[in-house]
Image (tube, rainbow, N blue to C red):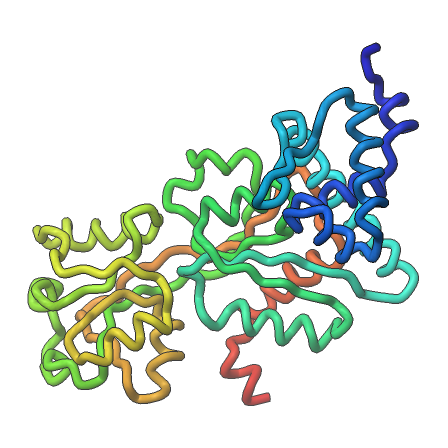
Amino acid sequence: MKSTVVSVARKLKLYQLVVFDQVLRSGSLVGAAQALNLTQPAVTKIIREMETFLGADLLVRGNRGVHATDLGKVVERRVHAMLTELRSLTDEVNAYHSGTTGQVMVGSLTSTSALLVPHTLRLLKESAPGVLVTVRVGHMDQLFSSLLAGELDIVVGRIPDDWRWHEYEPRLNVDVLCEEGLCIVAGANHPLHVCSQPVSLAALHNFPWILPPRSGLLRRTVDSLFEEQGLEPPVNVIESVAALTNYELMQDQRTVGFFSVQTAQQLALGGKLKAFDLGKPMRFGSIGCFYSASRTLDPAARLFRECLTLATQSPADDAAAD
């Protein structure tokens, strides 16, 4: 018999979906039972009820736990979206009854300004201390996929130069927040810091470099800088966007790399890092706030977006001085 929306709504319960989702997140029936404060037999019964109704197994049990069958993967994808909407409904009801509460899931691209997201979080907590914020740092493809799946509410990061033609563009909205500069940095005692004249990219070329990974959008920007100067990309290279790791690598006083201007300014406060004078500014790109075009932001996420805008209008240093 073919299932209908009515038959599925009658047979499947939201709590069953919560249990199924938790089993896959935990990787085991025992882990799900502990997370939900249930017994393992109760979890097993719920999963079997779902499998009986859907007419096929949803889980495969093995030595390393459980994972979804082909049908289970179909159900898993839809369950994620449904539970995301359920979380939004819960947050909005709570916000209606008791003011601004709830949870916002934020993704931060690894190349994002080191100051913008922390400053935004401070502003958010000042106005709504009851909001729980979870921040996940990663690469664009990872975070955008999570955003489309409903696992994240907002992603903050550099807007791709080709955004108008980008594969994600039709499904995501983006608010332009600010423009960010790019600089080349090294340890404060790097030999070329003593130059009284601007340093050229050619003069730095033969030093060890830290570059963004080839898979990242920032790498295209960096490679184009060398190409414009008629230079091949450096040979002695470490690929990394981990700011603190890069900072430590530069303490050999030879290794050089790229940072956004605000990140460089923050790390230079300790006196162990310094940006080179290149004679002219380099453009990092526009920083934006990305969110789903098909899903309405809940109150907590909307407040976070408002605080992002405020953070770009009131620099963190000014806010700290107040």
Compared to 179, does 318 lie above or below? below
Q: Residue at x 66, y 65 (%)?
A: 133
Q: Is residue 175 left or right of residue 2?
A: left
* Residue 289 at x, y percent in the picture: 55, 54
Q: How many marks?
A: 0
Describe residue 25's horizontal placement relative to residue 243 as left or right.
right
Position of 6 with respect to 74 (left or right) is right
Position of 16 relative to 35 (above/below): above
Residue at the location (64% across, 66% down)? 307
Q: Position of residue 195 (x, y in %)?
A: 9, 81
In the rendered image, which quarter contains the C terminus?
bottom right
Residue 132, picture quadrant = bottom right
Q: Quadrant of the N terminus?
A: top right
Who's the residue at 57% across and 45% down the image? Answer: 64
Considering every residue shown, the one lying at the far front of the view is: 63
Q: Is residue 280 left or right of residue 134?
A: left
For this rendering, which residue is in front, 251 or 69? Answer: 69
Residue 258 x %, y %:
27, 65
Figure quadrant of residue 4: top right
Give the image location of residue 105, x and y in percent.
64, 57
Residue name at image x 35 percent, y 70 percent: 261
In front of the other: 222 or 179: 222
